[in-house]
């Protein structure tokens, strides 16, 4: 029912920028928290950034490693969540996953299939 389509990944040099987009379809998403997670080779998946649902005032949260460099935002009219990434570092290299999660029912928890971000010279 719910489908998440990610885009914007690719190869970028250190210090560069990328913007990831995730378009969700299938339901009303204002009551969902939306976020980005990443997984580097040999490491566990980790939270990058989240933006809460309307019920929580769309508050944002960031991993310490990306604070000041990444910005998460959402456009409810377009059912889209963005991750603006700046000052990219090689350690940001990972597969980035989009996630949406219902504010009141954790059974409604969906993931995209991931988009590769590679930061290298």
Image (cartoon, grey):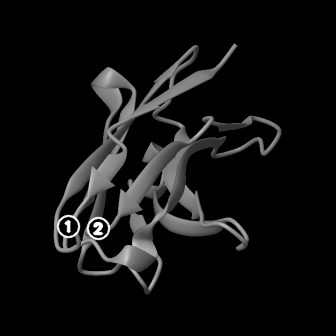
Q: Are marks 1 and 2 in contact (CB under 8 Å)?
A: yes
Q: Which residue is mark 1?
A: 86
**Residue name at image x 59 percent, y 44 percent:** 99
Image height of 112 relative to 96, above or below = above
Across and down, in percent, residue 106 comes to 78, 45
In the image, 103: left or right of 66? right
In the rendered image, which quarter contains the C terminus? Answer: bottom left
Image height of 56 relative to 88, above or below = above
**Residue name at image x 60 percent, y 67 percent:** 40
Q: Disc count in the image?
A: 2
Which image quarter: residue 14? bottom left
Q: Which residue is mark 2?
A: 70
Q: Do we see residue 91 in this rendering?
A: yes
Which image quarter: residue 101? top right
Q: Residue furthest bottom?
A: 64
Q: Secondary structure at mark 2?
A: strand
Across and down, in percent, residue 7 comes to 38, 33
Q: Do we see residue 83 in this rendering?
A: no
């Amino acid at each position: 029912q719910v489908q998440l389509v990610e885009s914007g990944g690719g190869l970028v040099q250190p210090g560069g920028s990328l913007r990831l987009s995730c378009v969700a379809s299938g339901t009303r998403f204002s009551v969902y928290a939306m976020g980005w997670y990443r997984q580097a080779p040999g490491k566990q998946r980790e939270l990058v950034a989240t933006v809460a649902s309307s019920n929580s005032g769309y508050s944002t949260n960031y991993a310490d490693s990306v604070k000041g460099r990444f910005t998460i935002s959402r456009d409810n009219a377009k059912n889209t969540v963005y991750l603006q990434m700046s000052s990219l570092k090689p350690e940001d290299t990972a597969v980035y996953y989009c996630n949406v999660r219902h504010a009141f029912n954790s059974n409604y928890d969906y993931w995209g299939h991931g988009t590769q971000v590679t930061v290298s010279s």
